[in-house]
Image (tube, rainbow, N blue to C red):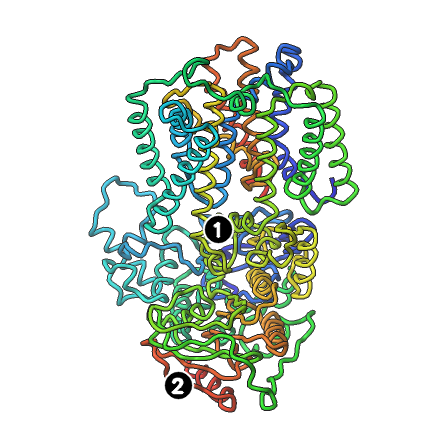
Amino acid sequence: MAGATPTELVSLFGSPALFLLIFLVFAFWLGDTFYNSDQRMLEFSQALPALVITLGVVICLSVGQFDLSVAYNASLCAYLVIGLNYRNDVPMWASILITLGIASLIGFINGILITKLRINAFITTLGTGGVLLGLAKAYSNGGQGINPTPTDHPLPDWFRDYLGNFQNTAPVPVVIALVLILTVALLFTINGRAIPGTVSKPVRFGILAAVAVVALLAFAGSGLAAKVSVNVVIFLLLAVVLWIVMSYTTFGRNLYAVGSNPRAAGYAGVSVTRQTISAFVLAGLLAGLAGVILAATQGSAIQGAADGYLLPAYSGAFLSTVLISRGRFHIWGAVLGALCLTYVASGLVVGGVPYTWADVFNGAVLIAAVALSSVVRRASR
Amino acid sequence: MTDQALTVECRGLTKRYGLHTALDGVDLAMREGEFIALLGPNGAGKSTLIKLLDGVLTPDGGSVRFADGVSAGVIHQDLGLFDDMTVAENLFMGRDVSKHLISPTHEYRASAELLEFVGLTRVNPQTLLRDLSLGERALVATAKLWSQGAGVIIVDEVTASLPRAEASWLVEHLKIAARSGATVVMVSHRLEDLLGNVDRYMVFVDGQIAMDAPAEGVKRDELVRVMSSGRDQVEVEKRDVSARPRGEIVVELNGASVNKIRPLSLELREGWITGVSGSSVSGFHDAGYLVAGVARAQQGTVKVRPGTKVTCLPAHRDVDGTFPDQSVEFNMSVGNTNRWRKFGLINLARMRSAIATAAKDLNVIPSDTEAVITTLSGGNQQKALLGRVVADDPDCVVLCEPTRGVDVATRREIYSFVKKLANQGCAVMVVSSDMEDLASLADRIVVIDDDGRVERWVESDDVAEYCTARSALG
C-alpha cells in the first residue's frame, strides 16, 4: 500500500485481523452452531445494558477521566425504575424520566466533586459507586426483589416490547434503512480514522468500496433483516447520535481536546470544567438508560443486577482504541469491541468450553488485542 | 582537540518520517572534551539527530557507534528532576545500587565529586532541588547523566527559559564539564549564548550538515547566513504608526491583578501591538492570560468589547500549547471549530481543507496535517499553534513568547505574520522575554518589574532604544 509501512499496517489492522481470524476459526470449527442468527441476536439484545454503559465510559475516557460508578448507577436505576412504578404507582413513563434524571444527577455530582473540589476521579467515583451500592441495598430492603405480575402492578406492554423483548422484531424496511445508515457511518469512520492520510485516493476508495460491499452482502446473506429486535434498533440509533456528537460537533471535539491536554484546552478557550462535568452527566445518563433497559429485559427488579458490567464496559471502551480509530476512544470501536468480546465468549461456550470460563477468555482476548497494536506501534518508532 | 578519543561516530545516518526525510546520510564524529554547538533552522534534523543518539528512534539507514562504555544522555527543558528531593537523592535516583542499604556519607561524598565535575562546588548535596536556580538545576541534571555513563551530554534548548546572565553562567559551567572529559553538545536558538564559548559549530540545514568547523574565527553573520540558506528571506520593517488612527478599544484592564501581577491598567486597541516585558520572576505572562481570559482577575476588572473573540498563544508550548497525541489538524482546530459549523455540525471536509491551506500559508513542515504534532520540530509546532490562534479571525490575540525555541528564518516569518495581522485591524499583545520580539513588533511596551508592578511605559519612539539597552544588559 502506498506510503504505509508494513509495521504501520499491522498496528492499524492487527487487532481487527485477530478478531476476524477468531471468527474464521469459529466458522470452520463450529459452523452453523455458531453462525446462528437467532442465537447471536438474542445475545446482542442481552448485551444491550452493558453496551449502553460502554458508550458512557467511552465519553468519560475521551475527556481523560474515569467513572467507576457507572455499573452501580445502572444497578440502582434498574431497581428504581420498577420500584417507583410498583411501590409508588408512578406511571412508567414518568418513572423512566425520574430515573434518568437521578442517573444524570449522580453524574453531575461526580463531575462537580472532580472539577470543583479537585478530588481524583478514581477515588471520587469509587466512593460514589459505594454510596450507590449502599443506596440500592437500602432501597431494596437488603436485596429483596420486586416481581410485578399481570395481576399485581403489571408493567406496561410497551416497556417490555420496545426496550426488553428480543422477540419483538422491527419491521424489515426500518432495519434496512438502519443498516444503510450504519454502513455510511462505518465508511465515514474508516475513512476518517482508520486509514492513514498517506494512502492514495484510489486505494482509499477501493478499501471503502470493499468494506461496503462486504458489509452489505454479509447482511443480505445472513437473513438478519427480519430478526433485529426493536431495542437493538433503538440502541444502534443512539450510537449513531453519539458518534455524530463526538465526531462532528464542537462539543465532541472539545471533549477529545480536554482528554489530550486539559491545560492546552484551557488556553485554547475550551472550558475544561464544563466539558468534564458534561462528560460525567452523559456517562450517568447512559448508565441510567442501561438500567432501564435491563429492568425491561428482566421484567422485575433485582438488586445489583448490573454490578458485573463494569469490566465488560471498560474492555469494550479500551478495545475501541485499537479496532478502528488509531488510538482514540471511539463510539463505533467500542460497540464493535464489546460485541466481538461477547461473541468470542459465546463461540467458546458453543464449542463446549464451560460457561464459567468465558470471563477468563474475555480478559485474555482483550489483552492480546490491545497488546498486538501497542507493541507493534512501539516497535515501528 | 583532534588527538582526543572519539566518543561517538555516525556514518550515513538517515531517518525518514513517511515521505519526509529528516536526516539524509549524515557523517559526523565527536570527541572527548569537546563543547559543540548544534545549530540549524527548525525542521533541519537537529531533534531527529538527538533522538537517534539518545536511542529513542532507530535509524532507517547508516549507523551510530559509541566508544566502549559510552552512551548519550539528553537534558530537555523540563530537566526530569524531582524538586522535592535533595541534590544527592536526585543524582542517585534510579541507579543500580550494588548495596541494598544506601550509605548517606558515601552518597554525600560521591555527590560532591559529581558536582565538582560541573563546577558546582558551592552547592551542598543536601540542598533541596527547589532551592537551586534553574541554571544550577540544569547542571545537576548534567552531573547525573555523567554519573550514569553518558559520555555524550546533549543540552537541548535549556537556556531558552533562562535570563541572559544565568544562561551565560550555565554555558561557562557546561564548558567546565566538557573540559573534565565529556562531549557536551548544546542546542540553542540564542546564538549570543554560544558565540565565543564553544569549540565547534555544527550547522544542519535540510537534514544535512551545512557546516562543521572549529569555532575560531567564525562570525555571527556567517552562522546566520548558513542557517538561513535555502530559505526566502523576509524583510522585517518597523510599522509606521504615526499615521495610524487610534482605533477602538477592544480589551481594557482596570487595576486587574492576578498571582504576582499587581493592579495593572492598560487598553488594547484595534490595529495596535502592545508589548509586555519583564523577567520570569514576576510571572509577567499572567498579564497576557488576564487579557485572554485564561486567568481570572483577583481584583479589578477586565472589560472586553461585546462580541470580541480573544485568543492566546501560551508561553510554554509543550505543557500548555500542544495536544501531544493528536494530529496537526486537530491541534489547529481546537477552539475554532464553530467557524465551520452548519446546523450544529462541523463540516469536516471544509475544515480540513481550510486548515491545510492555513498550514501551507504558515509554511508548516511537513505539509501533511494528519501528522502527529509531536513528530514536528519545535518551530513548526509553534507555527501550527500560531495558525490555531488566528484561525477564527479573532479581534484580539495575546502572543506569549511567540518565538521561543524558533530559528532565525522562522522568527522573521512569524514577525511579518504578526504585523500583517495588526495591519488588518487585530489588537495584538506580545508578552515576551525576548527583546528582539518587542523591538521588531511592539508599538509601545509596558515593563513589569520583579515585584509585578508596572516599572514604566515605553512609547513608540523609545522602543528601539529601550530594547537595545535592555538586551545588552541581558
- Amino acid type at circle 1 is Val
Choose mark 2 or mark 1, whichever is in front: 1
Residue A314 seen by the camera? no
Separation (CA) of disc 2 from disc 1 = 38 Å
Residue sitting farthest toward the right: A202
Residue A187 seen by the camera? yes
User: B38 or B461, which lies in front?
Assistant: B461
Query: Percent from the top left, x then y, of residue A44?
Result: 57, 22
> Which residue: 46% across, 31% down?
A96
Name the residue that disc number 2 marks. Answer: B456
Query: Percent from the top left, x then y, of residue A87?
Result: 36, 24
Residue B182 found in image quarter: bottom left
Task: Give the chain of mark 1.
Answer: A
Is the residue B208 above or below the residue A45 in the image?
Answer: below
Residue sitting farthest toward the top: A352
Q: Are marks 2 and 1 in contact (CB under 8 Å)?
A: no
User: B9 or B340, which lies in front?
Assistant: B340
Q: Secondary structure at mark 1?
A: helix
> Which residue: 70% across, 21% down?
A225
> Which residue: 54% across, 37% down?
A374
Q: Badge 1, how many Cα within 10 Å: few under 14, some, many 20+?
A: many
Name the residue that disc number 1 marks. Answer: A258
> Which residue: 65% across, 61% down?
B359
Report the quarter where the N terminus of chain A lies. Answer: top right
Q: Secondary structure at mark 2?
A: strand
Query: Percent from the top left, x then y, of residue B77?
Result: 44, 61
Tell me: B41 left or right of B36: right
